[in-house]
Image (cartoon, rainbow, N blue to C red):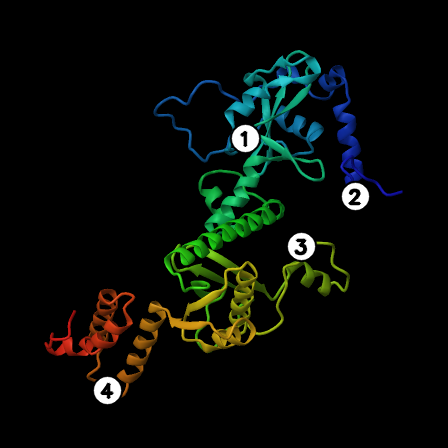
Amino acid sequence: MVNRTKKGRFLKPTQVARYNQQLKNLHKSSEECDQLVNLDTFVPLFDTQSTPAGSTLDDHSYIQSTGSFDEINEAFFSGKLRALDFTRHVVDLQALFNNMKCVDCANVSLKFKDAVGVLPAGICGHLVIRCYNCLRFVQVAMGKTHSSPHGQQIFDVNTKLATGMYHSGIGPVQLNNLFTSMNLPNISESLIRRRCDEVGHVLEDLAEESTSKALCEEGHLSATNSIESTGITASADGAYQRRGSGRCYNSLSGTATLIGKRTGKIVGFSARYKRCRKCDVAKAKHRTPNKHACKKNWTGTAKSMEPDMIVEILKEVKDKNNPVVTLIGDDDCTAFNRARCEVSSCIEKLSDKNHVKKNISNKLYKLKSKHKELSVKTITAIMKNFSYMLAQCKEDTDKIEKSIDSVVLHQFGDHVKCG
């Protein structure tokens, strides 16, 4: 017969024995507990007074636990209990004070001086306190919790930690490096991944909602400011997880965004993934992968990700009655040609200012090998003049055409065409 816990998880034989022993320990009477461990002589490692000024205690020093603490830890908590001075934790004071009650004793208030240790759960956890009335060990949550789909209570701060990790663009390794410096408990990668799975679909829904609102705003401004316009003007570009050298593109993922010209907000986005970790592990073990949210959606080359993503975004905004009539981007013609063939043949192409300056700079450096007079200082001066000229002739193509010669003439002291 398959053994399960109350939460429905499968257990190995050794885990079954340990789980049954824990249940026996929890149901032992107070007399049996006193026989197992002499609790009357147990002194909790908790000091209600603040550390005096000039104390020699090191901020990262760990005081060795007493013998009675080790016995309680092994007997009742399977070695998972940590001493109060073992590390720091993130604590919600209001939630901790509200939970300082023993339910078995008709909500008798607990005392901090009876604290035994902490059961860590991410960067939060449960404070274990011995009730002075019933002599039971009570687990007091040190923060707010919410229920998972499986019924398990999850600390809010751990879920917010996963959200912050996404927002700051770091991973579990960087998080643990930071926590180690702050003397906070390290978080297992499996825990942070579960919390990421919890908030991932919520963040995706919020992103979809945000881009839809921005697209409506962009369409409204375009229709208000231009009577003849039948769509919006937007800038599109792609990015890769691993930077390409211009000759080699081997990134496993890529993203693309569409930004409205008038609002400056993202009105569309897309992503491509060439690998799925869970699918790769299942394939290596020659078995069917478990049910999961697989993100793998690309089998082509990394270079071909960007045109495909841009075309997908243009189709989506067109289906929302806000088609793109003018596309601003780099000088890569692949995406623009596909957009004209698959989306609309009336799309106009404009070059992005940053990409234009980058391309001109690259060509000048190529000429440097043949013309020694074209030094780095000269190229820098030319590009500086070119940037000034674009800033003075902003959104005026005729003025740019007339002033383009001033970029070079300015170098020789001729300022007739300077704006």
SS for dot 1: loop
253 horizontally vs 52: left or right = right
| Residue type, label 4 | His
**Disc 1 or disc 4, which is closer to the eye?**
4
Report how far apart the C-alphas of labels 1 and 2 lie in the structure: 35 Å
Q: Which one is earlier in the sequence, the residue at label 3 or at label 4?
A: 3
Say if 30 sits above or below 92 in the image: above
- Residue neighbourhood size for the residue with mark 3, other residues' Cα within 10 Å, grouped as few (<14), some (14–19), many (≥20): few
Identity of the residue furthest to the front in this view: 227
**Which residue is denoted by mark 1 in the rendering?**
64
Alpha carbon of mark 3 to alpha carbon of mark 4: how far?
56 Å
- Distance from label 4 to label 2 (Cα)? 74 Å
- Residue 241 location in percent, x, y? 50, 63
Task: Quickly name the residue at label 4.
Answer: 371
- Give the residue pinned by disc 3: 293
Local secondary structure at mark 3: loop
Identify the mark nearer the N-term, 3 or 1. 1
- Quarter of the image with the N terminus is top right
